[in-house]
Image (cartoon, rainbow, N blue to C red):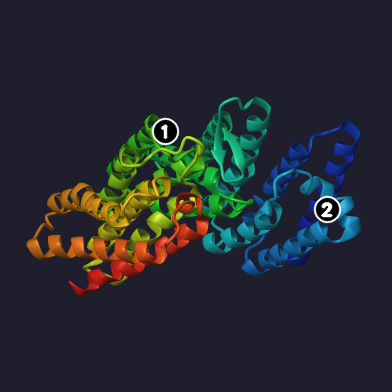
Amino acid sequence: MSPFFAIAWVLISLGCLMGAVRYLASQSGMSAELSRKCVHIVMGLITLTFPWLFHEFWPVFVLGLVSVILLSAVRTVGFLKKSIGTVLGGVERASLGDVYFPVSVTLLFWLSQGDPIFYCIPILILTLADAMSALIGVQYGQNKYSTSEGTKSIEGSVAFFTVAFLGTHLPLLLASSVGRLESVLIAMMMGLLLMMLEAVALAGLDNILVPVGAFLFLKLYLVMPVSDLLHRLLLLLPLFVLMFVLRQRSELKGSSLLLSTLCLYAFWALGGVSWLMPPLLVFLLYPFVLSKRPESPELFGLTAVTTTVATGFFWLLLSKVFFVPQGLLASAVAFAAHFAIIMASNRLALNPDRSVFKEGALAIFLAWLMLMLPFLVITNLLTYPVLLFSFLVIATTMTAFLLTQKELSDHVLNKKRWAYRGLIVFLGSLLVLWI
């Protein structure tokens, strides 16, 4: 088929689809969410044909560019917004998922180079798992959990996992040379990881994060032997269970807890047990040193989790790419400094009459004792100079934070303060390079 004819066929099909869905919605009283997901599903099924329609990247790029322009026009141009725009923009939440959809399709086709397995499995998960999660959640969701955009349901997340599992397992089993056990293990990890990724994505970004994440996981897992796959699953499952068991005790709720679990798995998968220890200790210990805020059901949101892990991930990636020997220690010191600042700022925010010096000193000592000391012992990095230097770095970081943050009454809930704290901790971790 001529690529120009194929481009025209796809665009005409998508245009007819949106017109048909709008007509059915107006005639049957179909909900905005249902009509949106109908468009989502059919768009996805049409794009599944791309590996057989196109043998070059440029037609898919043209289609993606045209689609983004048209979908943006539907959101902004008056008469289009009042007609076709009601199909895509009728939901209450602010989302650019429909615009991100062609972007992710184009990116996936380029990344996969048209390979049906690496292209179709992510698109299949994006198309069916995301839609099924939303529809099941709206219709049957009774057990809610909080996200930055409102609430989602456990029922919807289970539906996402189920469809993602089948959308990975069946294609691998039926259309590839991957063994039965390998396909089951890969599908289970894909389902769990992508379910958590979908739950933490904001403003429709799941339409990019989920398929790209699925592609990267496939590239990683398809070359692994069964023993490595089983090893990874046996770590992921306990982390997921631990998150579920500690959800009542933890100040992290909903999507923040899921993001924490994803980050812990990423530290282990990319770095190993030594890199996992500091964030895991922070995750397990911080609820025991916080003063509660009864009026605030969620002290730590996605911003807090992202800020806390960012410096650690920076050092992990730097160590893996450029082989920086101090990276592991710098990451551990950063988590210890975050732990100390969380402790001191929370206690001072609730009790402003307390001595800043005493609370800061107590937090420094506890962070060093409860986090750095066990880490240094278990990783065989315990020497007197390292022990002393790590204490000094934590103390320096805490002092810089307290001297530059005079008012702490809203620190725990203030996103700008979290970002500033992340910068202070990052700069403090750079001192480790002197060792």
Report if residue 297 is visible in the image: yes
Residue on which disc 1 sits: 247
Identity of the residue drawn at 49% across and 40% down: 298
Please report whichever mark, 2 or 1, sits nearer to the chain's N-terminal start: 2
Name the side, left or right, on which 202 lies relative to 289.
Answer: right
How many other residues sit within 10 Å of disc 2, few (<14), some (14-19) or many (≥20)? few
Residue drawn at point x = 50 percent, y = 42 percent: 255
Secondary structure at badge 2 equals: helix
Where is residue 320 drawn, in percent x and y? 30, 65
Task: Give the residue number, with chain letter if any, for mark 2.
Answer: 15
Position above or below: 393 against 379: below
Query: Furthest-bottom residue in view?
Result: 434
Seen in the picture, residue 185 relative to 103 is either above or below; the reply is above
Residue positioned 89% across, 59% down in the render: 78
Instruction: Specify the quadrant that holds the N terminus.
Output: bottom right
Residue type at mark 2: give it: Gly
Q: Position of residue 117 (x, y in %)?
A: 52, 50
Give amino acid for label 1. Arg
